[in-house]
Amino acid sequence: MKVSINFITMKIAFLVIVVLMVSPLMGIGQGYIRDTFSSVIVHRDPRFDEMAAKQAEINRHSVVSGPRRVNGFRIQAINTQNRDEANAVKAELLRRFPDQKSYLLYQAPSFRVRLGNFLTQKDASQLRKMISALYPGRGIYIVPDIVDYTPPLTEDDPKN
């Protein structure tokens, strides 16, 4: 037993001596190497600044002039359970008022035809009077709705 304990003790002693001899070399090797290239010089093309400015302008223009969904009003021309009747009224309104956008909505069991995108009730009331003259006796109403609104271009905005 005495031989095996001395052999294990010698192995441990040898391992400690090797670690003590190698560890200072590892510290020296890592600690004294200096970075001779500590700064980087970037030569940027000035055209990148121009492109970034153009893209910022395009983004600003698209946000300002693009269509938005806002609270507004539409004219409800019909509320029926007959799909064919609703489609016929929508087609007739499109034929008579091609500059107005029309919508066919379905909320079970009714089909509704709505016309226009108006910001105020006053704007919608003018068209409501014209539609009421075309369809007397029907309930033509101005209803609040979420409408598509495209702000007009100002003079400083580019046209394209």
Image: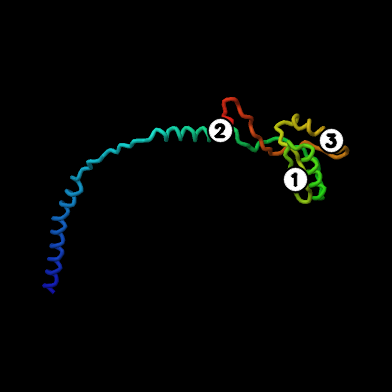
Quadrant showing the C terminus: top right
Pick the residue in front: 22 or 119.
Answer: 119
Name the residue nearer the viewer: 134 or 112: 134
Q: Nearer the viewer, mark 2 or mark 1?
A: 2
Distance CA(mark 3)–CA(mark 2) = 39 Å
Question: Cα distance, mark 1 to mark 3?
Answer: 18 Å
Q: Position of residue 139 (x, y in %)?
A: 84, 39
Q: Secondary structure at mark 1?
A: strand
Q: How many numbered marks are there?
A: 3
What is the x, y in percent for residue 110? 79, 48
Type of amino acid at the residue the image marks with label 3: Ser
Label 2 sits on residue = 61
Mark 2–mark 1 Cα distance, whole angstroms, equals 32 Å
In the picture, measured across the screen, residue 160 lies left or right of residue 112, that is: left
Hey, what amino acid is under mark 2? His
Sequence-wise, the earlier of marks 2 and 1 is: 2
Res 90 quadrant in image: top right
Query: At 57% from the left edge and 35% from the top edge, which residue is drawn?
Result: 63
Indicate the position of residue 10 as horizontal and vertical percent values.
12, 66
Say which label, 1 or 3, has the lower sequence index. Answer: 1
Residue 10, compared with residue 91, is above or below; it is below
Residue drawn at x 75%, y 39% is 115
In the displayed structure, does residue 63 sit left or right of residue 80?
left
* Residue sticking out furthest to the bottom: 1
Look at discs 3 and 2 and give the one toward the viewer: 2
Task: Check whether the beta carbons of the residues at disc 2 and disc 1 lie within 8 A of each other.
Answer: no
- Secondary structure beneath label 3: helix
Q: Quadrant of the N terminus?
A: bottom left
* Direction right: furthest residue: 137
Check disc 3 and report the residue beneath it.
132
Question: Residue 104 bears which disc, if any?
Answer: 1
**Element type at marker 2?**
helix
